[in-house]
Amino acid sequence: AKAAGRNCLRIFDEAMREKIQLRVRLASDLRTALKAEQLSVHYQPIIDLFSGQVIKAEALLRWEHPELGQVSPEVFIPIAEETGAIHEIGNWVFREAARVAMQWNHQELTEDSVLRRISVNRSPRQFFTREGCDDWLAHLHDQGIPGEVLGVEITEGLLLDDRPDVMRQLTAFRSAGIAISLDDFGTGYSALSYLKKFDIDYLKIDRSFVQDIVSTEGSRAIVESIASMAVRLGMQVIAEGVEEPAQAEVLTAIGCRLAQGYLYARPMPEQAFMAFAAAEIET
Ligand code: C2E
Ligand code: CA
Ligand code: CA
Ligand code: CA
């Protein structure tokens, strides 16, 4: 039994070591990934369920590793945050999204057309620098890009930290016309009190609630409550991870107007996204 125990430990050690080695390797490879053009930005449409139109999109980072193939952002974003690579990479994602958002809007801009936004995920780490939001805002200013074509997605944890500079940066983004989305809503601390302290434009209801909205009364009740609370607080709700028509039906019935998920489209490269968005709008 003792020997077996020792064996288990050895296997565990081995697995641990491999995991750590992979992280070290990814951390190192990530430093050159941007220059080596292994990174790309994909765009996932966000649909207005009432009109069927694509009114927004989310920018999502992709990494095609030369030997390992696609590495998930769930894996490499935390590494990029730890090593600090997130700053350079995140700035690049923002610039790409801004460029694509301008193209998307120019395609058929009429006088009363609503500006379509592309929102970009921003890690807490990206708020905790000396430059703060300056880099992003300076870029928009230099390029003459209106903030109204962009959004920033943040998570609850950022708001709970209560750092004065976070408030300043969020206010600066909003003053520039950039919308703020609260991501993965419902999965964090959900202290709710911060919702009246910060100006949030969109609540993104986490996929875990949407997943069993059809089968589970509890999830439906939660989403319904979030939707009505959001309306009263002047926010809009986006349902994440909509995969089935039945989920979309329930969402429409309980007044959740905006949806994102594989049912409509997966995240796509720039060209495919532009084609998809243009085709949708004609119907
Ligand atoms: P997120 O911000 O919650 O992004 C939504 C995730 O849900 C994306 O995963 C998207 O591909 C996935 N998704 C969309 N629709 C569906 C669906 O119907 N079903 C399922 N199962 N999944 C769906 P992805 O692209 O793997 O990104 C994972 C996370 O990585 C993101 O979660 C975000 O936290 C982070 N991330 C991605 N790109 C960036 C970035 O440029 N900057 C930062 N800071 N984080 C990023
Ligand atoms: Ca997001
Ligand atoms: Ca999310
Ligand atoms: Ca997430």
Image (cartoon, helix red, strand yellow):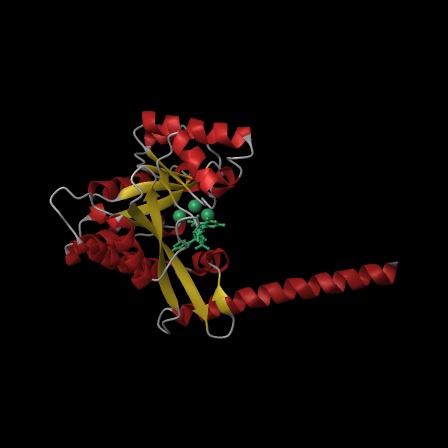
Is residue 193 found left or right of 18 in the rendered image?
left
Is residue 148 found left or right of 280 in the rendered image?
left
**Residue 18: image x %, image y %?**
62, 67
Q: Residue at x 24, y 41 (%)?
A: 174
* Quadrant placement of the N terminus: bottom right
Is residue 12 found left or right of 265 in the rendered image?
right
Figure check: 17 above or below 36: above
Q: Nearer the viewer, residue 22 or 280?
A: 280
Q: Can you see residue 139?
A: no
Figure check: 264 above or below 213: below
The total number of labels drawn is 0
Q: Residue furthest left?
A: 111
**Residue 239: image x %, image y %?**
41, 40
Figure check: 226 above or below 11: above
**Residue 21: image x %, image y %?**
58, 68
**Residue 118: image x %, image y %?**
29, 50
Give the image quarter of residue 217. top right
Q: Residue furthest right?
A: 1
Give the image quarter of residue 60. bottom left
Q: Nearer the viewer, residue 125 or 63?
A: 63
Figure check: 280 above or below 239: below
Q: Residue at x 48, y 66 (%)?
A: 70
Q: Can you see residue 41?
A: yes
